[in-house]
Structure formats: C-alpha cells, structure tokens
Image: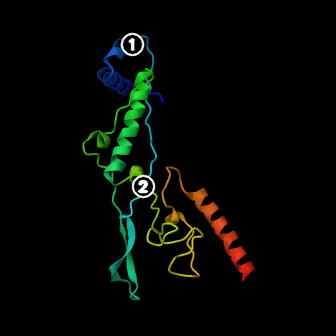
Amino acid sequence: HRMAPEATAELAEALARQAPALAPEIAARRARGRVMHGVYLRAAWEQEPRFSNAVELASTRDALGVPLSRLVWQQSALDRHTIRESLMLLGEYLLERDIGRVQLADWLAREPVELPEEGEIAGRHHMGGTRMSDDPRRGVVDRNCRLFAQQNMYVAGSSVFASAGHANPTLTIVQLALRLSVHLDEALTRA
C-alpha cells in the first residue's frame, strides 16, 4: 500500500537500523522519489493439543439444577515459542534473499511472549473438548463420533478433533457430519 511521507521516513529509518547495509540503497531510492512500501503480516496458527485443556462441569448449577460448564484453557510455552520462531524463520528467509525485513510486533518481541487477550489475534478455535480416540481413557467419542458412555449419542463438530490445523474447521466439520450420517444410515439399515 502507498504510505504517507511520515510513515515512509519512519520505515526508512527502521530499515536502516535493522539492515545497515541497505541504508545507502534506501537513501538513494528516497532521493529519486521512490515510494517505500510496507506489509503487515498476519499469521494463523492453532495451539498444541493439551489434555489439561478441557471443558469441565462446574460446581455451580443453573436454575434447573444442571451443572454449568467451565472452560479450562491455557496456552503453553510451546504455543508462544512456535509463533515467534515461525516469524523469526520467515525473517531469516527474507534477509538471506535480501527481499525484506520482519519487525516483530511489541507483544511478540517481549520475553516472555504474552499473547493479546482481545482482538483478532485473541480469537481461537476451541477444539478437542470431546476428543475422538480408540481408547476411552484418551477421548470422549469413538471413531464413529459415538460417546463411549452412551450407546445412542453422537457428537459431530470440531470438539471431536484430536488436533487442529491452522485453517478454519468448517469444511472438516461438514465432512465429519456427512461421514456420521452415512454411518447412522448404515446402522439403521442393519437394525
């Protein structure tokens, strides 16, 4: 995007500090009236699957006496490390090819990394609350999305994912629901 003159000057100064060898080239380009460009990078990631992150029943109850749910969710040191390390590797790649420089956002540059609690970066896909497994000690539903503790209850959604990728889960959830519908249809046909 085209930058205002003040932003261009700020970017040029930042680049000269980060990459002193580029300083003469930057000054020459600015002297020739070349417009500087900057890009904001947005990364998408999901946290590592952790058994300690779970949905639990709270001791408090609703008006009908049903226990309320409580989300137990923490990010790990690996989550924070992965975010920063990925950007550092991208920065090295761009630097080695002399095609750009990466400047970390303040929250990523601090040690330890503290992820924002608000805004788009704070948005997450909560997955794995009813994790799929072949072993009832390691999951809540079996490979057909049936709860281990119930013969006639199924769950189809991102909560059954054993792990998550970086992309939105919608299409995977749709495929999972279609797969479950085929399984249920076959089960009814056999009955």
Q: Position of residue 78 (x, y in %)?
A: 34, 49
Residue 125 is labelled as none
Q: Is residue 26 above or below residue 55?
A: above
- Residue 123, numbered circle: 2
Residue denoted by label 1: 25
Name the residue type under label 1: Glu
Callout 2 crowding tier (Cα within 10 Å): few <14, some 14–19, many ≥20:
few
x, y percentage for residue 180? 64, 69
Q: Disc 2 on helix, strand or loop?
A: loop
Towards the viewer: 20 or 175: 175
Give the residue type at disc 2. Answer: Gly
Q: Residue at x 35, y 26 (%)?
A: 11
Q: Is residue 35 above or below residue 87?
A: above
- Residue ranking furthest to the right: 189
Residue 114 percent coordinates (x, y): 29, 49
Name of the residue lying farthest toward the front: 135
**Residue at the image position 29 percent from the left and 39 percent from the top:** 109
Residue 146 occupies which quadrant of the picture? bottom right
Q: Is residue 191 left or right of residue 126?
A: right
Q: What residue is shown at x 48% (from left), y 57% (from top)? A: 163
- Toward the viewer: 43 or 93? 93
- SS at mark 1 in the image: helix
Residue farthest along the left direction in this orientation:
111
